[in-house]
Image: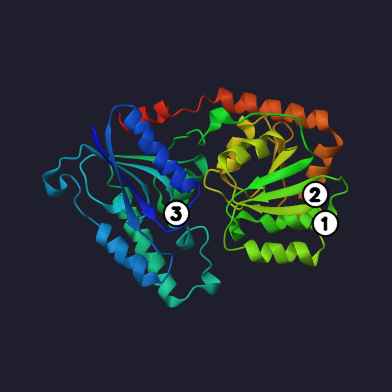
Amino acid sequence: MRILVTATHAPFLYGGGERHMQNLCAALRSAGHEVELLRLPFKYSPDSDIERVMSFCDGYDVSAPNGQHIDRVISLQFPGYGMRHPHHVVWLMHQHRAVYELFDESKATPERRQLRHQIVAFDNRVLSGVSRRFANSRRVAERLRQFNGLESTPLYHPPPGAERLRCEDSWDYVFYPSRLESLKRQDLLIDAARLMTSKTKVLIGGEGPQMERYQRLIERHELGDRVRLIGPFSEAERIAHYAHALAIAYPTFDEDLGYVALEAMYAGKPVVTCRDSGGPLEFVVHDQTGFVTEPTPEALAAAIDRLADHPERAREMGRAGRERIVGMDLSWPRVVAALCA
């Protein structure tokens, strides 16, 4: 088939979403399909720019652009799923979260309330009219049901490079690789380092808008010998950091899916996450493949110390996590078969 994949593009921002769309296109091509990725420019502000791109997508016919017949459209993100095609499948990564679960009525401006009304109405209409609806995780499906009354089927996929991840001896650190953003809550882990009684160190990988704030927090509490912001890292470094970690910390807030938890499990490492972390809770089983704690520095510190004090138990949890994730048989061919059925 000739397939058009739609997603958004925020220049110079690269993370799990970008890897997701690229790997989907690669999997579709491996299955013999002809694929184009259409990325729509997207800015989170001002609201008028969001309205503009939503208006552009609403009903835009992509069945045969410039006479080139397209057999199927697979849309991943708002607002691309508003485009029109007779065989339009949505595999939802997330909606525009700022007007859904992250919306704060007490702080919203009249313009933001109006935007919320417009987006919810847009989503209700266009998502109810597509051929089939899938969600990136059970958590994303729950949000769609909660806010829009629409059902979708969770469709999981493996994280990039899962086959290369491995487990080696612990070097007594916890690793948290992710973009440095407020929702990822690296500050919880930095504060936890002040309370840990073990000698376990903390490695925080990635870059983002909170880098300077986190560095100041480390300096203020004199944690330079315990917590390191290692910045961007290569693929070889990523594999090595996972391989030698005692555990993977992932105290993110209400994540859509959470590659970090999946990667940790493929690497045979226990995961420390939180009760409100969203997607990771679909994989991490408390006290079996890691710990699910309250989202507080005290709870995170206690969980990490427990793993450090019982290294054999940490290894057992890591092995259990790998067995669990391998047993789920996540695969791109399974995803492609579902999206192209």
Characterize the local packing of mark 3: few (<14), some (14-19) or many (20 or more) Cα atoms within 10 angstroms.
few
Q: Is 277 displayed left or right of 172 in the figure?
A: left
Q: Residue 216, how many percent across, how many down?
A: 72, 66
Query: Viewer-proximal residue, 341 or 36?
Result: 36
Q: Residue at x 38, y 61 (%)?
A: 42
Q: Residue at x 53, y 43 (%)?
A: 257
Q: Is residue 324 above or below residue 271?
A: above
**Image depth: mark 3 or mark 1 in front:** 1
Characterize the local packing of mark 2: few (<14), some (14-19) or many (20 or more) Cα atoms within 10 angstroms.
many
Query: Viewer-proximal residue, 199 or 80?
Result: 199
Residue 301: which disc? 2
The answer to which of marks 2 and 1 sits earlier in the sequence is: 1
Q: Secondary structure at mark 3?
A: helix
- The alpha-carbon separation of the residues under discs 3 and 1 comes to 39 Å
**Image depth: mark 3 or mark 2 in front:** 2
The answer to which of marks 3 and 1 sits earlier in the sequence is: 3
- The chosen color scheme is rainbow
Q: Is residue 238 above or below residue 54?
A: above
Q: Which residue is mark 3?
A: 147
Amino acid type at mark 3: Phe
Amino acid type at mark 1: Arg
Q: Residue at x 30, y 67 (%)?
A: 52
Q: Which residue is mark 1?
A: 194
